[in-house]
Amino acid sequence: MGIEQGLPFDEDQGVLGGKEAELQAEIRELRGLLERAGRAGRAAPNRPAPKVMAQQLALPDVVRYPLAEFAEGRGKRVPLPESVEEIAEVIGRGDAVRLMEGTRASGKRRWRRSLYVPTDMTAEHRIASMIGLEAATRLSFSHGNCIVELPSCFALRKAYAADHALRLRDAGASQAEIARELGVEPKTVQSLLDAADYWQPRLVR
């Protein structure tokens, strides 16, 4: 009797155990499908190459940004290189020039500056320290995971140097004093003063 009573129980237990195992397997399969679907909808995290990261960490500290201040003020009508102008449309003219001034030149060409822009911007990042977190975040939205080229803004530099030389001369400085102030050869001062005749009508007073 005991055996007959025990058989149905054992058979039911086996059936229930099999169904439970099947359900658990289905649940695991569904979870796997959901995870794969979620990953398919997200872009894989982009990480810069170690060499690029090292270059960013090695960037020099910058205390002042005279060209950026000039670009926002008297030099606001001086044209910028196309790549810098494109960035200026996102973060503003002054901040675009600040990035150029605060980025170390790379390669054999002294005018070439390359800057990696991460997709995830933090307040501690070098770019945020130069232009502020708000502007840096906008830049990460538009240029995230890109290496942007930042030419040296030759026309802006030329206009700034010419304007500065003229202001020093008007204040009574000699050409030798202007040369020391600007860190150029004395013979260069005259060419800057000559260039000032071209730039003065194009600067904002």
Image (tube, rainbow, N blue to C red):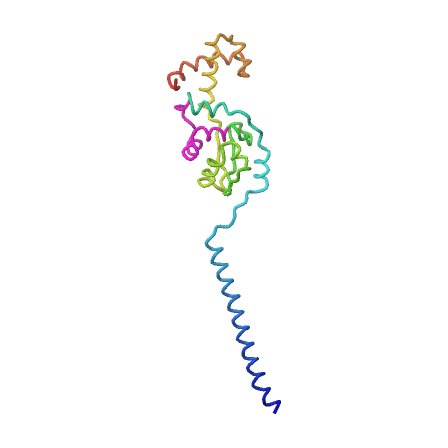
What percent of the width, then of the height, locates residue 89? Answer: 40, 33
Q: Residue at x 51, y 27 (%)?
A: 101
Left or right: where 141 falls relative to 50: left
Q: Height in image: 141 above or below 171?
A: below
Left or right: where 21 falls relative to 158: right
Q: Height in image: 127 above or below 77?
A: below
What percent of the width, then of the height, locates residue 150? Answer: 48, 31
What percent of the width, then of the height, locates residue 176? Answer: 54, 9
What percent of the width, then of the height, locates residue 96? Answer: 46, 31
Q: Which residue lies furthest to the right in this view?
A: 2
Q: Residue at x 55, y 27 (%)?
A: 62
Number of residue marks: 0
Q: Which residue lies furthest to the left in this view?
A: 201
Instruction: Pick the residue in front: 10 or 196.
Output: 10
Magenta stretch in the rendered image: 75-100
Q: Which residue is drawn at 43% across and 29% down?
A: 93
Instruction: Pick the residue in front: 152 or 32.
Output: 32
Residue 98 falls within the magenta-colored stretch: yes
If the image is split into quadrants, where does the N terminus sit? bottom right
Instruction: Pick the residue in front: 56 or 187.
Output: 56
Instruction: Give the dominant element type of the magenta stretch: helix, strand or loop.
Output: helix
Q: Height in image: 133 above or below 5?
A: above
Instruction: Pick the residue in front: 13 or 158.
Output: 13
Residue 164 falls within the magenta-colored stretch: no
If the image is split into quadrants, where does the C terminus sit? top left
